[in-house]
Image (cartoon, rainbow, N blue to C red):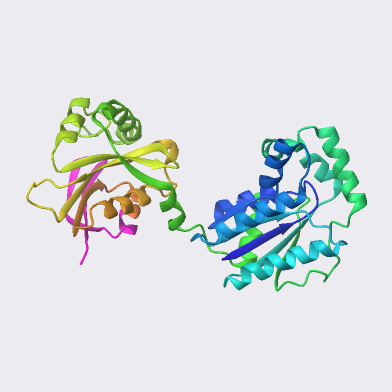
Amino acid sequence: MDLILILGAGAVGKMTVGQELARITDFRLFHNHMMIEPVLELFGNFQGSLISRLRDEIFSEFMKTEYQGLIFTYMMAFDIPSEWEYINSLAERFEKSGGSFFCVELVADQEERLRRNRTENRLKNKTSKRDTELSDSRLKMEDEQYRLVSFEGEIPFEHYLRIDNTNIEASDAAKMIKEYFRLPDRSARELLRRVSLQEVKEEEIPELYRMQVESFMPLYEKYHDEGSPAIESMERVRRRYAVENRKYYFILQDGARVGAINIGHNDPNEKTVSFISPLFILPRFQNRGIGYAAIQKAFELLPEVTCWKLETILQEPANCHLYEKCGFVRVGEEKVVNEAMTLIDYERIRK
């Protein structure tokens, strides 16, 4: 497993850059204050040895997961030998697991860091910084008391990058890190972990219907097709729900309902052919890969199916791209609905 260590003085932007980096890679963020804040809240003071033990447990458990790696943020005093011992032990620990160790150092002038010390994101995630006068004073004292910026050539790690992010947005710094170390994009595996299917209960049909109307209404307003799910009745949804060999599932991301999918067999004696109709994602959650993950989950639910079928709008290239990405190919004749809209069939055959 890989570790990306982000070093830097107080309020330099370690956590914020880490958040942006986690958003575009398959790395999870474990920022320093995720252990510090609960200990301060519970004990009323800094308990260094306890915080270290808690961090160590997190590292141990996380290394058992299938993630690409972890982003860890730390304010290092370069003039204290024990700090070097700790950083070297982290590098050795992750490299022994077969992973790589990446070290990023962020530097910014004190004036900019004092400004960042009062930003909404920092105060939201770090309770101990909310007394901003006290926090500003502590930041200045740390700058005077410790050497928080490395000397040129001092950091010995093979994979090292130093960024002066005084005038650089966190998202741009994250992209620089990703590109410099050639880190992989966020994988489909990460999204698949967060997406699940939950069978719709009969009493939940009104909620299902509301979500269907909201999801399909933009397409109806664009094409004005009379067969649109946006304008079908709730009774029709109930009839589809009642079909013995078909089921509706809510699509959940992180436990929240973001769409729905209906899958199953039209012929009660046929178990190897399944239809997807309809599949929809609420507009505010579209273009996030959720539809792709939902289709993969549907494949897992019906492993005996060797032929999947669906219908989509030819004039919606994003939809066509999604299904082709999932292994579907176009079949049959085009069906003209009106001058603006044509329906096409897709099939996915598993050999």
Q: Position of residue 52 (x, y in %)?
A: 71, 54
Q: Is residue 261 something one can see in this rendering?
A: yes
Check the image and report above or below for 56 versus 128: below
Q: Is residue 210 magenta?
A: no
Type of secondary structure dominating the magenta stretch = strand
Give the magenta range: 323-351
Relative depth, front residue between 186 and 155: 155
**Rendered-image quadrant of the C terminus:** bottom left
Residue located farthest toward the left when viewing the structure as drawn: 269
| Residue under the image location 48 percent in, 61 percent down | 66
**Rendered-image quadrant of the N terminus:** bottom right
Q: Position of residue 42 (x, y in %)?
A: 70, 37
| Residue under the image location 32 percent in, 51 percent down | 297
Relative depth, front residue between 269 and 127: 127
Check the image and report above or below for 280 versus 170: above
Q: Is residue 45 left or right of residue 192?
A: right
| Residue under the image location 73 percent in, 71 percent down | 157
Q: Position of residue 330 (x, y in %)?
A: 23, 57
Q: Is residue 333 something one can see in this rendering?
A: no
Asked where in the image residue 300 lies, by quadrant, the reply is: bottom left
Q: Is residue 348 magenta?
A: yes
Asked where in the image residue 125 lies, by quadrant, the reply is: top right
Relative depth, front residue between 83 and 311: 83
Q: Is residue 116 left or right of residue 90?
A: right
